[in-house]
Image (tube, rainbow, N blue to C red):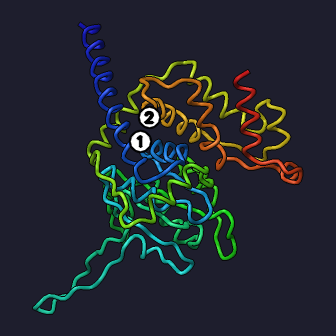
Amino acid sequence: MMKTEASLDEKAIVAAAERALSDIAAIRGEVSKVIFGQESVVENTILAVLSGGHALLVGVPGLAKTRLVTTLGEVLGLAANRIQFTPDLMPSDILGSEVMDQDDSGRRSFRFVKGPVFAQLLMADEINRASPRTQSALLQAMQEYHITIAGQRYDLPAPFHVLATQNPLEQEGTYPLPEAQLDRFLLQVDVNYPELAAERQILLETTGMSETRPEAIIDAQRLIEIQTLVRQMPVSETVVDAILSLVRSARPGQGNASTDKNVAWGPGPRAGQAMMLCARARALYEGRLAPSLDDVFALAEPILQHRMALTFAARAEGMSVRDVIAGLVRQAKG
């Protein structure tokens, strides 16, 4: 009886996965109608959402970061808001505030007016321009999925995702994100310049009389179902061991000579959790029912790079975090 039930569960998961594969393929196709090229950027951003997490998009202005987030909101059928971060932005501008109402009899009472954080997909544009006080207000929302105003708890909509952008060049007048907040982002997605063919298509498609508008492929409830499926996907012991080995090798004091020499501090257990979720989501994204070692190696950079820092000596030698991660991946591949 128990074997029959187990086989039924496996069949149900396979059937659900096949349906999810079809939905994800449709999502990819719809996004590609609007976002040209940038396949890895689109993939990693969608992986963050499918895994139920947040993503930090880092790139210079004009690389369609805002357009990507807007497009995803429409394709995934999510209620989306955008916040343009500035140094004078206050926590109440994001979370909301209490206002006093007066009825016809003159009786006064407070009423909470929700801020833009009450969205299923929140775009935090140039997040590093906000003051630490405002960043910490968003941090609670990202981690706890609720906010507290005047002692009253308000739950955020489900699902809730923050896709934040950051300009790596213009740092004057900015407030670098603290490590604790960076760790809340499942992935850091580096947005680079498009390739020649993609840029040619951008010129031709976006300067005419009309532009393609994406259509909704799924809704919020369907997205939650896919996120639940991602957590149910089986992960082999080989993949689990590879994740543990890779994450631990990025920490000083764990026996890796290169890391001990070049890394000041490394990723915590949250990096391994992110790798487990994103590896499953990447398998689904590419049409597979279980993650492989290739998923782990492909996700090493976007998951680890914002969760570790180099020593002064390594930076003085011109080394980057990406160089260290690439070396660790080469060692893991053997």
Q: Residue at the location (56% across, 24% down)? A: 240
Q: How many marks?
A: 2
Q: Is residue 192 above or below residue 61?
A: above
Q: Which residue is mark 1?
A: 50
Q: Nearer the viewer, residue 230 or 15?
A: 15
* Kind of residue sitting beneath label 2: Tyr
Q: Which residue is mark 2?
A: 285
Q: Position of residue 287 (x, y in %)?
A: 42, 28
* Kind of residue sitting beneath label 1: Leu
Quarter assignment of residue 34: bottom left
- Pointer 2 with pointer 1, Cβ within 8 A: yes
Q: Residue at the location (38% across, 57% down)? A: 121
Q: Earlier in the sequence, mark 2 or mark 1?
A: 1
Q: Position of residue 261 (x, y in %)?
A: 85, 40
Q: Nearer the viewer, residue 185 or 208?
A: 208
Q: Is residue 169 above or below residue 31?
A: below
Quick one: SS at disc 2?
A: helix
Q: Position of residue 155 (x, y in %)?
A: 32, 58
Q: Position of residue 215 (x, y in %)?
A: 29, 52
Q: Residue at the location (27% across, 48% down)? A: 219
Q: Residues within 10 Å of mark 2 (few under 14, many from 20)?
A: many
Q: CA distance from mark 2 to mark 1?
A: 9 Å
Left or right, 114 with reference to 54: left
Quick one: SS at disc 1?
A: helix
Q: Nearer the viewer, residue 274 or 49?
A: 49
Q: Is residue 153 above or below residue 2?
A: below
Left or right, 282 with reference to 311: left
Q: Residues within 10 Å of mark 1 (few under 14, many from 20)?
A: many
